[in-house]
Image: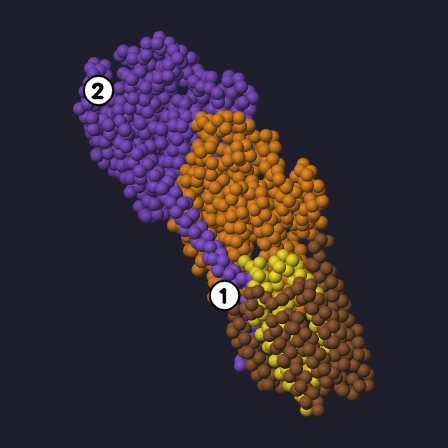
Chain colours: A yellow, B orange, C purple, D brown
């Protein structure tokens, strides 16, 4: 039988891989996608636990996470476009104006 | 009307401020005129207090107002709790009295953005009055902080060259003190609740009855004392004062000297001392030493100043030293001397700042070396300046003497004998620095061509000074007007602090043998 | 009965206020001067009325209380006046001499720009002085005490455009303040000392009555009286606080006559007289007073020997004469001291006014010839007796009086002081010797003054020589009256030994009698001794006059030789023993240096340094920490992940 | 059968996720990400949440991925000039491994409690998953739902403002 632990472990692995990507890649869009991986791993946790507990709340939360992810995608990608217009690059090493 | 006189008085300027916000910013005359009217009305509202004889008969709080305000399930409660007694009465009166004068002094001095200036002045007045009449520690704290902000802007926006530095220094100094006080206030409340004493809000009269253990009082007094010592300011926490005074616009300096500094001394009398009477004796030697050092130090430093305004600022340090010394004497004379010296300092130093403002408006400099021989060009100004100078020196017959004399005498009788003796030398130094300054500014021949075309005081300026001069002589000749209403409150305060305030033995005139006839001739209808 | 006492200081006050506020509008000198003089005269009349009423009264002490001034706790101070023989004498002197000097000033100050200001100040001075002498408690006295100081400041600084005048005014006030410091300390101690015995009072009558509560010769009484004596020193220009008086001559001459000769400077003597009971209880203080008095009398006389400014000579003479009065107070000759105070008021006022008349004439002549020479320098005078006969005669009479020649007023008073200093049980023969030598010097320098001014060749610039007029009537009438008083003023106090009954001493008996009796202070000695001493002192005075005559009339070249021979001593004396420089070195400059140091060193560096230091530290920490905000996305991401790892680690292992 | 399916799907999901972080070309990353999303959708179905699986595919694999690929194409991104990885590659890896280790420990040590809610498999089967979601969303979570819609509106406006040159 597949227990809730399986799902949670899978979710943890996915989350860590996402983290790895965020920490190591330079391309902003790839980082963005890695964040999506992390969000999805969280969604998986929500749904697994929702099933386990027998309650709908977790799934509603997943719904909201998706909403946020969509909004984030819209704004984040727009930001990247705006940035690209200025710097001709979306390398995060060039994103260093917000300092001091 | 009488039921909420204090509220009316306190919040009337705030109401006025709201109206000021709706006056067009380029209508300078209307702005200033309206503000003047508002402050005058506030003064009129406060007048019944001065004429009320109840203060002469009973030392307690009068004109009480009490409303519950914030109540978080019995865990935290603060009230809108106002009242006035003989101690705060004259400070309230001083505030309402000095405000119209301050407004009048801005007539020519403040040109840019007078709308903001007026609004802040009115806000400041509400803050000051509120602080004097609140009986709830938390409410007091709110008003205390409310005063700070407008003053910060008054210095920071309308000040002199170095205004930002001065404003920030003023703000940080005061804020550090206030935060310590806030912690102490919360601790007192917390302690009261913990110990199960029935506490209905932060009312100080209930806090008076608390019996805090000595070590708690020790630290709390330290926190309160530090906060008020900054505001007074006592040596060595005084360095914000010269900067703030020098940079502030005239009206700001006047209010700062006349009222804001009194917050510190008032704080000692109303809060720090009666709330923690057991810790007080431990600190008196230290505080008295600092007061005396302040007197001598302020005088010596004032002597060498090159900027008239800075000189007056340092003289404030010395004057406030007398106030504190008198207050710490813990007897009637000292307390009365300290209290009346607070008023005096407001009147005399306020007047001196106005005077400095007058010449600054004309010459746009305050350096002593720029002047000399002004008495030729401005005889009326010279006379007024001379009177105020001597009032500041403490010539008998003017207000300064009554305060200094009583404070010193009180200190001498109250066990601070050597402090008093050393402080008395301040009387000499006061003459030195004031007269030297007067000589260099007013006497001699006009050497600087820029001074040739100076105009004497205008009618408005004379009107500004006249009320102050009246009080210079009134307090000097008949201070009983003020003492009569202060005495009961001071007696009560001293009893509360566990000191015997009243006369132990009165030497009755009846003890004079019949061989010496004593005749009483009332001056009003003396017969020749 | 005496309830109109308050009118005495009130009249001049009214005059002062009217002239001060409206004088500029009135402009007419006759109205202004007339009003001021009239006010003084009214006050004089009231003083006379009260004086004579007191003469006929059996009760000699009367208090009049107008109202309460301060009442705080156990301190109750009234606006109250006290009339007793002592204050009665003083009000007579102050109003009498004051009226004459006001009258004189109308002529002397003619044409001055600040005419109204002058009379306003002068009237205010009279008011303050009368408050001083009439006050029934130490505080009202102190009002007058400081009030006269204020007026002295204003009047010395009358020619405020002159820097020297401003300096002198400030110096006078500040030195007086040093004395006031003593006065206040004495008052505090006294109030406390009596208070601890259950009598909280500053009232003179009550102090006198309760003085016995204090221990005679005890520390307290000594401290109290020494403090008060310091106050008296300041006001009456005694060592070490005398330096302001010679400088005070910067004021107009009538001011010097009224304030710095006749009235204000004697306030210290009056104050000791007022507190005689306390001083009598403190022999140590009495001794100090006597020594300081004698030393001042001698010391000031030496300086007077070498001055060339006519007013400065008189100023040092005043200091010296005040020394005599203190000597008298110190040896217990209270009434003799007051007696000398009175006669000195007459002849010294006359001398000052006379010198003023001379200066007026000289000034007039120089003005006429458009010269800017110093009209006060005696080396430019000489032979003026023919030009100014009235001035000369009155001046001479007063000079004789001050020199202590028999039959003139100064003789009686000075001789009594000398006799007491020798014969009193609080005196000492050394004091007598100092006093007698000083008397000889007085005679010398006073006659030197007369000879240089009125006799010999006229040394005035030729262009101005013939334009020196006799002064107008407003000036000469007061001179004549005062000259007359300088002659006859002494006859009310002829000592018993010369066949008189010393009515003056009897008059003051109610004030001083008790103290003298209680502490057994009296002058004892054989009549022969007294006669002998009298003879010696007269002889010394005559020798002084003779020497002056030899040096300045017979052999005018002598002084030059003399100064050449004793150049060192002469320089020392001429420069006033360098006392001013010494004070500058000891007090003034250190104070300035300390002030500068405290300001620039302590305030700016230390206190502000700490404050700014705290600000710098905060700023530095912030400056360091801001580098963590690199702006690189990865740094933030790493920080977040590290945070997560730490938190999760805490839950897993914690 | 269920277990096998789970392991298979999980394996593919992990591999796909790994290649999201690994691929040099962003387009390849994006395709891997779609694979990952689809795997998760399968897992959702296995967890008796068919509605969530549906919107997972529609919103994520559909809308968001289209957006991402659209942007990649728009910006014409090839391989980065400076290289794919930041300097602290090893540090990032260590952190990620540490995190994996810790979360695994956390999950393994933990005990899943709180079972026995009212939404059992039977309820889902009888009522229907979509309806259950709908009930929860429009009753208890009505306000957050509305706020979410506002959030989306704001995001749309924001995106338009940001990417337009002149408004």
Percent of width and height locating residue B68: 68, 61
Relative side of C373 to B456, left or right = left
Eyeballing the image, is C639 above or below B272?
Answer: below
Q: Is residue C216 visible?
A: yes
What residue is at 51 percent from the left and 53 percent from the top?
B173
Residue B355 in view (yes/no) = no
Q: Position of residue C266 (x, y in %)?
A: 37, 31
Residue that numbered label 1 is attached to = B216
Query: Is disc 2 placed on a helix, strand or loop?
Result: helix
State which chain disc 1 sits on: B
Q: Nearer the viewer, residue A14 or B6?
A: A14
Chain containing the residue with disc 2: C
Q: Which residue is most to the top? A: C466
Point 32% across, 48% down: residue: C219
Locate residue A74: give its quadrant. Answer: bottom right
Q: Percent from the top left, x then y, of residue C598?
A: 39, 46
Q: CA distance from mark 1 to mark 2?
A: 82 Å
Q: Is residue B184 above or below residue B313?
A: below
Label 2 belongs to which residue?
C559
**Farthest residue in the left direction?**
C565
Q: Residues within 10 Å of mark 1 (few under 14, many from 20)?
A: some
């Amino acid at each position: 039988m597949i227990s809730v632990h399986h799902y949670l472990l899978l979710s943890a692995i996915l989350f860590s891989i996402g983290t790895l990507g965020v920490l190591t890649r330079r391309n902003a869009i790839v980082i963005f996608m890695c964040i999506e991986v992390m969000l999805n791993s969280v969604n998986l946790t929500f749904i697994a636990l929702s099933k386990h507990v027998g309650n709908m709340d977790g799934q509603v939360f997943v719904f909201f996470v998706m909403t946020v992810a969509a909004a984030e995608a819209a704004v984040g990608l727009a930001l990247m476009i705006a940035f690209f217009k200025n710097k001709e690059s979306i390398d995060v090493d060039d994103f260093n104006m917000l300092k001091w | 009307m009488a039921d909420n006189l204090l509220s009316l008085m306190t919040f009337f300027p705030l109401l006025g401020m709201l109206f000021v916000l709706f006056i067009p910013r380029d209508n300078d005359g209307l702005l200033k005129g309206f503000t003047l009217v508002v402050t005058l009305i506030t003064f009129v509202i406060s007048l019944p207090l001065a004429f009320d004889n109840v203060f002469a008969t009973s030392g307690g709080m009068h004109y009480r107002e009490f409303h519950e305000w914030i109540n978080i399930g019995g865990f935290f409660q603060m009230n809108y709790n106002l009242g006035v007694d003989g101690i705060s009465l004259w400070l309230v009166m001083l505030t309402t009295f000095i405000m119209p004068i301050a407004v009048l002094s801005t007539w020519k001095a403040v040109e840019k953005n007078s709308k903001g200036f007026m609004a802040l002045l009115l806000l400041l007045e509400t803050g000051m009055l509120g602080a004097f009449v609140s009986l709830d520690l938390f409410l007091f704290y709110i008003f205390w902080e409310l005063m700070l902000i407008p003053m910060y802007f008054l210095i920071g926006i309308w000040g002199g060259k170095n205004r930002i530095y001065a404003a920030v220094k003023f703000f940080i100094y005061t804020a550090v003190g206030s935060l310590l006080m806030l912690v102490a206030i919360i601790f007192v409340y917390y302690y009261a609740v913990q110990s199960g004493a029935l506490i209905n809000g932060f009312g100080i009269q209930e806090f008076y009855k608390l019996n805090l253990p000595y070590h708690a009082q020790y630290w709390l007094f330290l926190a309160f004392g530090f906060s008020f010592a900054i505001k007074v300011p006592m040596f060595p926490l005084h360095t914000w004062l010269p900067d703030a005074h020098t940079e502030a616009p005239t009206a700001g300096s006047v209010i700062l000297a006349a009222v804001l500094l009194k917050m510190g001394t008032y704080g000692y009398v109303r809060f720090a001392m009666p709330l923690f009477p057991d810790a007080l004796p431990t600190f008196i030697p230290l505080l008295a030493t600092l007061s005396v050092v302040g007197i001598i130090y302020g005088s010596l430093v004032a002597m060498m100043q090159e900027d008239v305004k800075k000189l007056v600022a340092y003289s404030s340090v010395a004057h406030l030293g007398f106030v504190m010394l008198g207050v710490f004497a813990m007897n009637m004379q000292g307390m009365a001397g300290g209290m009346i010296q607070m008023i005096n300092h407001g009147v005399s130093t306020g007047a001196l700042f106005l005077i400095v403002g007058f010449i600054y408006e004309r010459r746009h400099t305050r350096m002593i070396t720029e002047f000399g021989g002004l008495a030729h060009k401005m005889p009326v100004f010279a006379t007024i300046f001379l009177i105020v100078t001597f009032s500041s020196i403490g010539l008998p017959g003017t207000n300064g003497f009554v305060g200094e004399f009583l404070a010193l005498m009180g200190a001498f009788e109250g066990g601070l004998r050597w402090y008093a003796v050393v402080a008395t030398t301040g009387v000499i130094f006061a003459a030195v620095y004031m007269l030297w300054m007067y000589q260099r500014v007013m006497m001699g021949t006009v050497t600087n061509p820029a001074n040739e075309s100076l105009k004497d005081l205008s009618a408005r300026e004379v009107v500004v000074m006249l009320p102050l001069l009246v009080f210079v002589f009134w307090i000097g000749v008949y201070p009983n007007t003020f003492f009569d209403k202060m005495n009961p409150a001071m007696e009560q305060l001293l009893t509360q602090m566990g000191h015997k305030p009243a006369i132990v033995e009165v030497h009755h005139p009846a003890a004079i043998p019949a061989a010496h006839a004593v005749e009483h001739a009332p001056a009003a209808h003396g017969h020749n | 009965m005496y309830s109109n006492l308050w009118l005495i200081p009130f009249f001049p006050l009214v005059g002062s206020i009217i002239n001060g506020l409206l004088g500029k509008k009135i402009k007419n000198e006759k109205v202004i001067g007339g009003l001021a003089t009239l006010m003084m005269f009214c006050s004089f009349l009231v003083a006379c009325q009260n004086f004579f009423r007191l003469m006929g009264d059996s009760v000699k002490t009367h208090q009049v209380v107008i109202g309460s001034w301060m009442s705080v706790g156990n301190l109750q101070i009234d606006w109250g006046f006290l009339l007793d023989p002592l204050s009665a004498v003083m009000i007579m002197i102050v109003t009498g001499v004051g009226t004459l000097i006001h009258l004189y000033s109308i002529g002397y100050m003619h044409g001055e720009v600040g005419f109204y200001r002058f009379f306003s100040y002068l009237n205010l001075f009279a008011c303050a002085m009368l408050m001083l002498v009439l006050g029934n408690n130490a505080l009202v006295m102190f009002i007058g005490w400081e009030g006269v100081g204020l007026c002295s400041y204003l009047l010395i600084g009358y020619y405020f455009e002159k820097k020297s005048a401003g300096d002198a005014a400030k110096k006078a006030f500040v030195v007086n303040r040093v004395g006031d410091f003593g006065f206040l300390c004495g008052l505090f101690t006294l109030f406390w000392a009596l208070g601890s015995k259950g009598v909280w009072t500053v009232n003179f009558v009550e102090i006198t009555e309760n003085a016995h509560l204090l221990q005679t010769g005890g520390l307290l009484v000594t401290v109290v009286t020494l403090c008060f004596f310091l106050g008296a020193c300041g006001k009456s220009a005694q060592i070490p606080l005398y330096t302001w008086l010679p400088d005070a001559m910067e004021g107009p001459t009538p001011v010097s006559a009224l304030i710095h000769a006749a009235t204000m400077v004697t306030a210290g003597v009056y104050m000791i007289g007022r507190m005689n009971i306390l001083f009598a209880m403190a022999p140590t203080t009495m001794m100090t007073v006597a020594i300081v008095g004698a030393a001042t009398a001698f010391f000031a006389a030496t300086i007077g020997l070498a001055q060339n400014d006519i007013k400065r000579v008189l100023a040092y003479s005043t200091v010296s004469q005040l020394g005599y009065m203190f000597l008298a107070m110190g040896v217990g000759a209270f009434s003799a001291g007051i007696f000398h105070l009175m006669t000195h008021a007459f002849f010294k006022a006359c001398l000052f006014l006379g010198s003023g008349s001379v200066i007026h004439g000289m000034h007039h002549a120089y003005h006429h010839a458009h010269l800017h020479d110093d009209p006060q320098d005696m080396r430019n005078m000489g032979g003026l007796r023919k030009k100014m006969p009235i001035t000369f005669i009155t001046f001479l009479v007063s000079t004789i009086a001050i020199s202590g020649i028999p039959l003139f007023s100064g003789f009686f008073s000075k001789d009594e002081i000398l006799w007491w200093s020798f014969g009193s049980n609080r005196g000492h023969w050394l004091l007598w010797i100092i006093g007698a030598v000083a008397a000889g010097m007085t005679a010398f320098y006073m006659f030197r003054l007369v000879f240089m001014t009125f006799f010999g060749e006229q040394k005035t610039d030729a262009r101005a020589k013939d334009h020196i007029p006799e002064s107008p009537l407003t000036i000469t009438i007061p001179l004549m009256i005062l000259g007359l008083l300088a002659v006859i003023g002494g006859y009310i106090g002829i000592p018993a030994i010369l066949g008189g009954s010393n009515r003056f001493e009897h008059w003051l008996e109610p004030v001083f009698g008790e103290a003298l009796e209680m502490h057994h202070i009296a002058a004892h000695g054989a009549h022969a001794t007294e006669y002998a001493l009298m003879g010696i002192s007269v002889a010394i005075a005559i020798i002084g006059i003779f020497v002056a005559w030899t040096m300045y009339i017979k052999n005018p070249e002598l002084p030059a030789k003399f100064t050449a021979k004793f150049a060192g001593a002469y320089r020392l004396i001429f420069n006033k023993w360098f006392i001013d420089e010494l004070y500058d070195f000891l007090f003034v400059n250190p104070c300035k240096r300390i002030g500068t140091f405290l300001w620039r060193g302590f305030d700016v560096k230390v206190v502000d340094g700490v404050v700014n230091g705290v600000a710098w530290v905060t700023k530095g920490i912030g400056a360091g920490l801001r580098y963590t905000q690199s702006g690189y996305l990865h740094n933030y991401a790493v920080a977040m992940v590290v945070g997560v790892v730490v938190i999760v680690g805490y839950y897993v292992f914690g | 059968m269920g277990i096998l399916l789970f392991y298979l799907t999980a394996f593919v999901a992990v591999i796909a996720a790994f290649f999201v972080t690994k691929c040099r070309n962003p387009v390849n990353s994006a395709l891997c990400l779609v694979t990952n999303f689809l795997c998760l959708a399968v897992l959702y179905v296995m967890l008796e949440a068919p509605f969530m699986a549906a919107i997972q595919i529609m919103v994520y694999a559909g809308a968001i991925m289209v957006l991402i690929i659209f942007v990649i194409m728009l910006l014409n991104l090839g391989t980065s000039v400076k290289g794919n990885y930041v300097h602290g590659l090893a540090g990032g890896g260590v952190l990620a491994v540490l995190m994996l280790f810790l979360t695994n420990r956390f999950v393994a040590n933990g005990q899943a409690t709180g079972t026995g809610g009212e939404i059992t498999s039977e309820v889902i089967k009888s009522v229907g998953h979509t309806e259950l979601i709908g009930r929860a969303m429009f009753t208890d979570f009505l306000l957050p739902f509305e706020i979410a819609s506002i959030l989306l509106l704001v995001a749309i406006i924001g995106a338009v403002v940001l990417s337009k040159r002149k408004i």
